[in-house]
Amino acid sequence: MRRCLFAFLLGLLILVPARTQGQSADDLTKLIEQLIELDSNDLSKSVKFRSGLEPSLYAVDADEAQMTVLKDPFTVHGQGKPGAAGWYRVRFTVPERIGKFPMPKNGYTCGVETNVLGAWETYTYVNGKPAGLWSKDGMMMAANQRPTWWMSSAPMPIKPGDDVQVAILAMASPLGRGSPEGYGLRHLRLRFAYSHTAGRAPFYGSVSAPGMGSGLLGVREKLATLKGDELEAFRVKLKDPLARLEAVFKAAETEKLEVLTKAMLDASKDLNDAMKK
């Protein structure tokens, strides 16, 4: 499937007339979704949900009797309702593999990434104890962030077999008068962190403002906002950097995380060079 996608993207660059060649932000979204699977696991499919702030469900031993597993974990709730809030909880055993890579038997420093429409607090526990060395008693918080911004509980040292629990309080923002957008889970993944972040973070990059950013997310943002001759010129500059992304997939096949880290770092340099004027 991945090789078919690359063949499709390169086919567009080679075969389509110059004024219409290149790819779209949607193409980049599909590619990013595949790349994310290389070094992280989706946790959203088994997340439980309950609307309402009280009774609070932040504690490690909170009663989940009134919670349900959503058919679509990314369903939006509480549009236009003052005080709209809800709880998400997920519990899992640290697996033998994360993405394409075996989890070291002695463990590795990882992180649980979250993103929520609105405002949110994340409480993380490992074997019943608050986790995340930079958190406050296992709690982190954020509000009104772009979907491409991921809050992580890293550094969180874990090993296969460890019990991890995550509780998320999601709230519409503003809370007092309500939000027409409501609140909803947008991202929930377990991923490798520690030294791997040195390559991973610049590879995905970020969106700093409309039409501006770095890494793959910045590339997608520019593809979505540029128009006319500027867009066509940008697509031409992307041809080689995108073709070389195949090296990132090949690096994952080695099952050596440090090889993937280097491949991502090298690719980020190519992508960021393409975005320079």
Image (cartoon, rainbow, N blue to C red):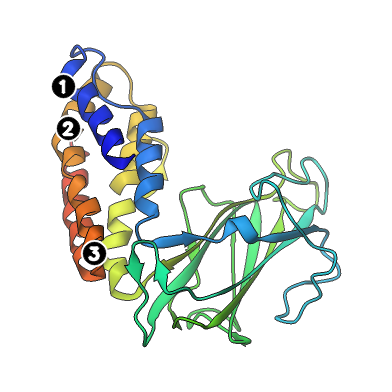
Residue located at (42% from left, 74% from top): 96
Q: Which amino acid does label 2 sit on?
A: Lys
Q: What element carries label 1?
A: helix
Of 198 and 255, nearer the camera is 255
Q: Name the residue under label 2.
A: 239
Which of the 4 image quarters holds residue 87? bottom right
Q: Which of marks 2 and 3 is nearer the N terminus?
A: 2
Image x and y of residue 264, in percent: 23, 57
Quadrant holding the N terminus:
top left
**Badge 3: how crowded within 10 Å, few (<14), some, or many (20+)?**
many
Of 159 and 172, nearer the camera is 159
Labels 1 and 2 touching (C-beta < 8 A): no
Residue 213 seen in the figure: no
Quadrant holding the C terminus:
top left
Label 1, label 2: how far apart the Cα atoms are: 9 Å
Image x and y of residue 53, in percent: 81, 63
Q: Mark 1 points at which residue?
A: 14
Q: Mark 3 points at which residue?
A: 261
Q: Is mark 3 on a helix, strand or loop?
A: helix
Which of the 4 image quarters holds residue 20? top left
Give the label, 1 or 2, closer to the camera.
1
Q: In this view, does 21 lie above or below 172?
A: above
Residue located at (39% from left, 83% from top): 107
Residue 95 seen in the figure: yes
Q: What residue type is labelled 1?
A: Ile
Label 3, label 1: how far apart the Cα atoms are: 30 Å
Residue located at (28% from left, 57% from top): 202
Q: What residue type is labelled 3?
A: Thr
